[in-house]
DNA sequence: TATAGTGTAATAGTAAAATATAACACTAGG
DNA sequence: CCTAGTGTTATATTTTACTATTACACTATA
């Protein structure tokens, strides 16, 4: 996995696991890969993985069981809220950052539509 | 100015100056505040300001004149391209991040419209 | 009960960002 | 010529993220 050197690695790992859960690669109740295995897969140190997991545990997204592993919460409501929260966060970032550039509400939408259409053109 | 502790300060300063130029608070040919003044205003060290300015100079967004100050480029085309680039960057971030969450093109647009409408509701 | 697999935690070392401070180089104006 | 204002640069120090390594605690199972 490639990391953005402007953002702490542990934070990017945390978001990576969020995504694995939200897209269902990790379902409720599933066991996560072992911390040492995650460290190998992501080519980072165990402590860095642990720091990311520590925050996910605080947020009740995963539950650790000593000697067994880390497990995705069974609480689907928590996961649903997480997805909504992450999406809103992204929309808010876009909105605020473009407003800081004096882009109006209407322009934001039309720019986005253009961007998506242009992506489709390129793919043909 | 408040900074996001997940992103280097010099980088946030760089983006701050981008914005000042794009929204016209700093027009082509304008002199920037002195580096020491910027440092005070942003409550940050001179070297940190200088690092941000150094990158802006490399990118020909500003031009330094030793003993006089730093000046916004007179080349409006460069500024126009910068604005377009920054907007596209934001759209791309949104698009990619939401796609990683399995949100479709259509959903991205409708979610954004909803988000903007909800903001308007709150403001009433 | 020994062993392999798991999470957890501590220590020490490295690298990058940011700070405090100082010095140097150039420009303009009295 | 001197001085104040400007950019530029260097050194030393602190802080934080990350790494390497080791050790400990718990679980399951052969």
Image: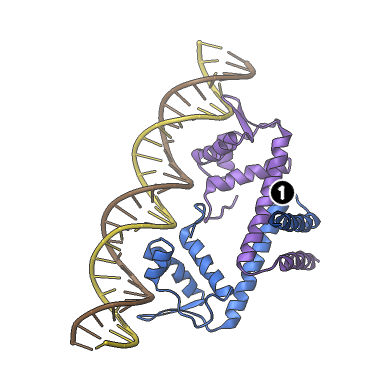
Chain colours: A blue, B purple, C brown, D yellow
Q: Which residue sits at x=56%, y=25%?
A: B66
Answer left or right for B7 relative to B77. left
Q: Which residue sits at x=51%, y=69%?
A: A17
Secondary structure under tag 1 reads loop
Answer left or right for B27 relative to A63. right
- CA neighbours of label 1 inside 10 A, class few (<14), some (14 to 19), many (20+): some
Q: Position of residue A97 (x, y in %)?
A: 68, 54
Give residue B95's quadrant in the image. bottom right
Q: Position of residue C20 (x, y in %)?
A: 43, 41
Give residue A36's quadrant in the image. bottom left
Image height check: is B84 above or below C22? Answer: below
* Protein chain holding label 1: A
Image height check: is B103 above or below A121? Answer: below
Q: Position of residue D24 (x, y in %)?
A: 25, 75
Quadrant for the C terminus of chain A in the image? bottom right
Q: How many marks?
A: 1
Q: Position of residue A73 (x, y in %)?
A: 51, 81
Answer left or right for A115 relative to A59. right
Q: Which residue is mark 1?
A: A101
Q: Nearer the viewer, residue C18 or B109?
A: B109
Answer left or right for A13 relative to A102. left
Image height check: is C1 above or below B83? Answer: below
Q: Nearer the viewer, residue C11 or A1?
A: A1
Image height check: is A12 above or below B38? Answer: below
Residue B25 appears anywhere in the view: no
């Amino acid at each position: 996995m490639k990391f953005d050197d402007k953002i702490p690695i542990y934070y990017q790992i945390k978001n990576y696991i969020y995504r694995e859960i939200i897209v269902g690669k990790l379902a409720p109740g599933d066991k996560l890969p072992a911390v040492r295995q995650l460290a190998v897969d992501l080519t980072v140190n165990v402590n860095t993985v642990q720091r990311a997991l520590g925050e996910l545990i605080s947020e009740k997204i995963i539950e650790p069981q000593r000697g067994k592993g880390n497990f995705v919460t069974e609480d689907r409501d928590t996961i649903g809220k997480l997805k909504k929260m992450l999406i809103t966060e992204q929309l808010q970032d876009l909105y605020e950052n473009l407003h800081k550039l004096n882009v109006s509400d209407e322009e934001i939408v039309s720019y986005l539509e253009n961007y998506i259409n242009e992506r489709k053109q390129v793919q043909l």
